[in-house]
Image (cartoon, helix red, strand yellow):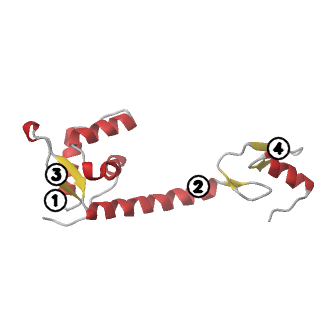
Amino acid sequence: MSQHKPKLDNLFRIQTLLYLLDRGDKGATGYDLGKDIEEQQGTRPSSGKIYPFLKELLENGYIEEKGGDTSRNKVIYKLTDKGRSLVDEIVGRMRILIDSRLNVLMEVCHHCGVKLYDAPVIEKLEDGSEMKFCCSHCQQAFHEGVHKH
């Protein structure tokens, strides 16, 4: 058994691992995996893409085979502890990337400083600029000079 981390250079590979994590102890067949990705993305990955990646994960101890429907030669795959650790690492790295990008894009309420994912109150100023508030209460408090705590 060779030991290397799988190359996670495309969305299909990451989705495969996340899907297997979601399936937990129930596991999933290669067919189930393809069907789920098709539902999410609109296109089904080929079996020539699915099964070699599952084989790579299996050979490196990230997934294991579980008894399936032997009459139809269906193999059920599920993550091992090593596989779950890999997914935790991937999710952690993705979270850092997403958080750093959102922080750059995120604006804050002019009154209370809460980060605005969506500003329901936008006040246009005479100079053409905008002031954004998380709610009408903060807008009113700002104009009344009420300070945040």
> Are the two marked residues, 3 and 4, in contact with CB atoms closer than 8 angstroms?
no
Q: Which residue is mark 4?
A: 123
Q: Residues within 10 Å of mark 2 (few under 14, many from 20)?
A: few
Question: Which of the numbered marks, if any, corresponds to residue 66?
Answer: 3
> Are the two marked residues, 3 and 2, in contact with CB atoms closer than 8 angstroms?
no
Question: Which of the numbered marks, if any, corresponds to residue 59?
Answer: 1
Q: Earlier in the sequence, mark 1 or mark 4?
A: 1
Residue 145 appears in which quarter of the rendering?
A: bottom right
Viewer-side label of 3, 4: 3
CA–CA distance in space, label 1 to label 2: 37 Å
Q: Which residue sits at x=89%, y=44%?
A: 126
> Which amino acid type corresponds to the residue marked 4 in the rendered image?
Glu
* Left or right: where 23 falls relative to 70: right
Where is residue 76 drawn, in percent x and y? 19, 47
Element class at badge 1: helix
Q: Which residue sits at x=76%, y=47%?
A: 135
* Left or right: where 45 falls relative to 122: left
CA–CA distance in space, label 2 to label 4: 23 Å
Element class at badge 4: strand
CA–CA distance in space, label 3 to label 4: 59 Å
Where is residue 124 drawn, in percent x and y? 83, 42
Q: Earlier in the sequence, mark 1 or mark 2?
A: 1
Q: Earlier in the sequence, mark 2 or mark 4?
A: 2
Question: Which of the numbered marks, if any, corresponds to residue 102?
Answer: 2
> Which amino acid type corresponds to the residue marked 2 in the rendered image?
Leu
Number of numbered discs overlaid on the protein picture:
4
> Which amino acid type corresponds to the residue marked 1 in the rendered image?
Glu
Q: Earlier in the sequence, mark 3 or mark 1?
A: 1
Residue extending furthest right? Answer: 144
Quadrant containing the N terminus is bottom left
* Left or right: where 107 falls relative to 76: right
